[in-house]
Amino acid sequence: MTQTKKSILIIGVSSFVGINVATYLKKNYRIIGTYFSTPVKINGVMTFKLDITNKIAVENVIMIFRPDIVVYCAGLSSLHKCLRNPAIAEQLNTTGVFNITTYTERFSTKFIYFSSPLVFSGDEGNYNEKDSPLPITVLGANQASTEFYIQKSCLNYLIFRTSFLFGRGYSFERSNFLEFLENKFFYRESFYCDDNLKIGYFNVLLLCKILGVAIENNVTNRLFQVSSKESITQFHFASLFAKIFEFDTSLILKKNINFPVDEAKFISSDFKGNLNFSMNIDNVESYFNIVIPTVEKMLLNFYSLYGIQSSKNRKAKFDDEIKYI
C-alpha cells in the first residue's frame, strides 16, 4: 500500500525562504503555499492568495487542507519598513502568527517558525538559545514576542533562529544581496557595503536540508540557532565572494550604513560598542550530529547546489556542505 505523503502548508510561499523551502520539500511532501501580494507558480505546488490578518480566511484554509505541518515564512522583514510602519509590522510578524497557531493547535498541526538574531541587542555576540532576548529594532521585538508566544502556547512547534540567509530568490521583481553582488560585479559597477554590523551568513538551501531532517525525524518543541561559526560584515562577505570567484574587489566601497534601531529600545539596551549578532551553534550541531561549514566553504560550493559548474566548484557536492557524522 502506497503511503500518503504528509502535507505542508507554507504561509508566505512567495518569500525568499518560502519559495526555497517549497522547492526543496516538494519531492517528499504535498506542498500547498499561500501568498498575499506576489503571486508565484511552482511546479507541483498549489498556491493561492491568503490574508493572514483575516481570521475567518485563515480558519477556512486550515480546515479545508488539514495540513500536517504549517511553515510560517510570511511577514515584513525589512528593518527600515518595520521601523517606519510598526503597526503593519506587528500585524504581519506577530498577529499573523497568532491567527495561524489558533487553528494549528486546534487540529494538532506542527507549527514551524523562522526568527533571527535580531531578538538580541547585538552588544556582545555569540548568543545562545538560553540568552534573554533584548531587541533594539522593531523587527527584533516582533520576533522576540512571537518566539515567546509560540513556546508558551503551542504544543507542537519548531523555531529556527537563522542568521543572514543567502541563495537564489527566484524573483524577477526583487533581488537579494547575493544576486545584487552578482549584478554589480558582472556590470563592473562600484557599490557600498556596510562594515559595522557583524552577523553570521548561511546558505538557504542548507537551512532547507536541516529543516527536512527535522521534519523527517519529527523533531518537536525545540529552538535551534542556525548560522555560520564566523560573524562577518557585509563588506567582508562581498570581499570573500569577489575573491573566490575572481571579481574586482576594488568595486566594493566600505561604508558604515545606518542601522534602523528603535530609539527607546536602544537606550534601554545598555549598548557599548559595534553591533555583533553572531550566534552560538553548538546546539544544532550536536543535536543533528552535523558540522556547519565556514562561509568560504558555503560560497565555494554555492553554484554546485543549483547544478552550475565552474572551475571553483567542479568537485563540490551537496552532501559535502554539511557533514553528517
Image: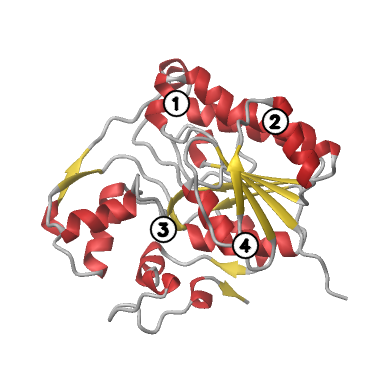
Quarter of the picture containing the C terminus is bottom right
For mark 4, what is the residue? 25
Q: Amino acid at mark 3?
A: Gly
Comparing marks 4 and 1, which lies closer to the viewer? Answer: 4
Work out whether residue 311 can be spotted.
yes
Comparing marks 3 and 4, which lies closer to the viewer? Answer: 4
Q: CA distance from mark 2 to mark 1?
A: 25 Å
Q: Amino acid at mark 2?
A: Ala
Q: Is residue 103 above or below residue 137?
A: below
Mark earlier in primary sequence (3, 2): 2
For mark 1, what is the residue? 82
Q: CA distance from mark 1 to mark 3?
A: 23 Å
Q: Residue furthest top?
A: 264
Q: Residues within 10 Å of mark 2 (few under 14, many from 20)?
A: some
Q: Residues within 10 Å of mark 3 (few under 14, many from 20)?
A: many
For mark 3, what is the residue? 167
Q: CA distance from mark 3 to mark 2?
A: 32 Å
**Label ID, residue 57:** 2
